[in-house]
């Protein structure tokens, strides 16, 4: 029998994706095959695209990224899914038996260690078909569109971060960053009861979209020399909860400038350099709580789908670009372009 082939956006080198015909992977025990309907472009895809390689230790044939996708079951394998069902995948390749997994913290799985994700160490959703672990698949309700499903991954990050925080009704909240995670954190913080909700950003690329969605009450210039005074004045003495959604020394410094004594900084952004300096005494002497936040728990992944299904947040409002798979390279180029104004791109294979 002739090998079944599919179109995929293969990462062939630094800043280079090529559309190629590659073999469709076989469905082995425990696996499920879907016809991909949509796949969101993530900031972490851009990091891999720039590097020209995945995080896999062993070479992966025809490596293609994509971890924010959904599709229709084409071959359920030995799972209890049915052909034609719409599903999405949680990218976290948790082991299921370590102490973290056994206590419901699969996102902290010792085998995952922040790297074992679909589309990072193995092939992902930038292809016509995806074959992956059935236990990572989740049914999609009809009320979650294919486009909306492309935002489950960033929404889960925002959802987990807001739940990790001590945010209470009427708290003053600052979000440092203007990308998709920052904006979704703002959207959920608003719904969780933030009164004053400010965004600190260093460029205006994503401002228009944020204003159109309208959850933030104030926009601050993170480059302003007097930013600390401005933030303290706006919040009458500092923000109760600050979310860092950039992953840089300057963004963390902005957080420390904005937080109130005894307040909390939730760290979401991944730093591209392994060590970043920060004003330790500001945190110590003001008893600032620093809370790390990554991905979400397995239970929260299902809850994230429900947040969209229930209409709690309309994530499709954050989408700026919908492109076909052959334009994957252009989608990445536009994402890093200073004039691109991209907030979220969805690829339709
Ligand atoms: Zn992502
Ligand atoms: Zn584990």
Image (spheres, rainbow, N blue to C red):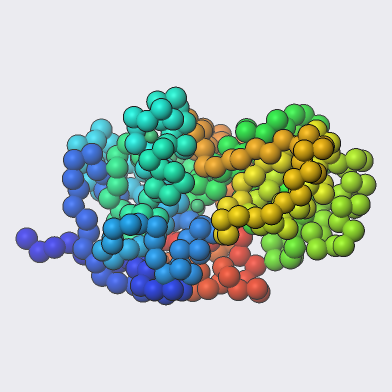
Residue at the extreme top? 103
From the viewer's perspective, is residue 219 above or below residue 259? below
Give residue 312's position: percent from left, percent from top: 62, 36
In this view of the protein, which residue sits in the foreground, 38 or 21? 21
Report the image quarter containing ligand 2: top left
**Which residue occupies 73% across, 58% down?**
250
User: Number of labelled discs?
Assistant: 0
Q: Position of residue 302 (x, y in %)?
A: 47, 34
Residue at horizontal 41 percent and vertical 27 percent from the top? 99
Residue 177 visible (yes or no): no
Compared across the picture, whether 299 is left or right of 21 comes to right
Task: Where is residue 57? Give x, y as percent.
Answer: 33, 57
Q: Residue furthest left?
A: 1
Q: Nearer the viewer, residue 161 or 191?
A: 161
- Choose top left, top right, bottom left or bottom right for residue 272: bottom right
Q: Is residue 168 left or right of residue 136?
A: right
Above-or-below relation of 226 to 216? below
The answer to whether residue 307 of the structure is visible from this angle is yes
Considering the image in quadrants, where does the N terminus appear? bottom left
Q: Nearer the viewer, residue 13 or 158?
A: 13
Give the percent coordinates (x, y) of residue 108. 47, 37
Q: Residue at x 48, y 69 (%)?
A: 50
Residue located 32% across and 63% down the image: 63
Front one among 341 and 158: 158
Quadrant for the C terminus in the image: bottom left
């Amino acid at each position: 029998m002739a090998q079944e082939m599919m179109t995929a956006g293969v990462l062939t080198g630094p800043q280079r994706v090529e559309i190629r015909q590659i073999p469709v992977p076989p469905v082995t025990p425990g696996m499920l095959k879907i016809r991909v309907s949509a796949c969101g472009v993530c900031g972490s895809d851009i990091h891999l695209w720039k590097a020209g390689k995945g995080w896999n230790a062993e070479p992966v044939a025809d490596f293609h990224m994509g971890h924010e996708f959904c599709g229709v079951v084409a071959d359920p394998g030995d799972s209890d899914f049915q052909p034609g069902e719409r599903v999405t995948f949680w990218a976290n390749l948790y082991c299921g038996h370590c102490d973290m997994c056994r206590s419901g913290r699969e996102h902290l799985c010792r085998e995952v260690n922040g790297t074992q994700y679909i589309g990072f160490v193995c092939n992902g959703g930038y292809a016509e078909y995806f074959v992956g672990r059935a236990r990572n698949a989740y049914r999609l309700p009809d009320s979650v569109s294919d486009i909306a499903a492309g935002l489950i991954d960033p929404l889960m990050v925002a959802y987990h971060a807001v739940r990790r925080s001590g945010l209470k009704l009427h708290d003053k909240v600052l979000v440092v960053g203007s990308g998709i995670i920052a904006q979704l954190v703002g959207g959920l913080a608003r719904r969780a009861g933030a009164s004053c909700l400010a965004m600190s950003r260093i460029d205006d690329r994503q401002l228009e979209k944020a204003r159109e969605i309208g959850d933030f009450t104030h926009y601050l210039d993170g480059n302003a020399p007097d930013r600390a005074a401005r933030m303290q004045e706006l919040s009458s003495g500092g923000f109760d909860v600050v979310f860092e959604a950039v992953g840089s020394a300057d963004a963390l410094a902005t957080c420390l400038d904005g937080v109130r004594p005894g307040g909390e900084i939730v760290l979401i952004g991944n730093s591209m350099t392994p060590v970043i300096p920060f004003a330790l005494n500001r945190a110590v002497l003001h008893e600032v709580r620093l809370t790390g936040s990554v991905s979400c728990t397995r239970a929260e992944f299902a809850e994230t789908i429900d947040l969209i299904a229930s209409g709690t947040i309309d994530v499709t409002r954050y989408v700026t670009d919908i492109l076909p798979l052959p334009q994957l390279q252009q989608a990445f180029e536009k994402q890093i372009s200073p004039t691109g104004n991209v907030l979220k791109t969805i690829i339709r294979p």
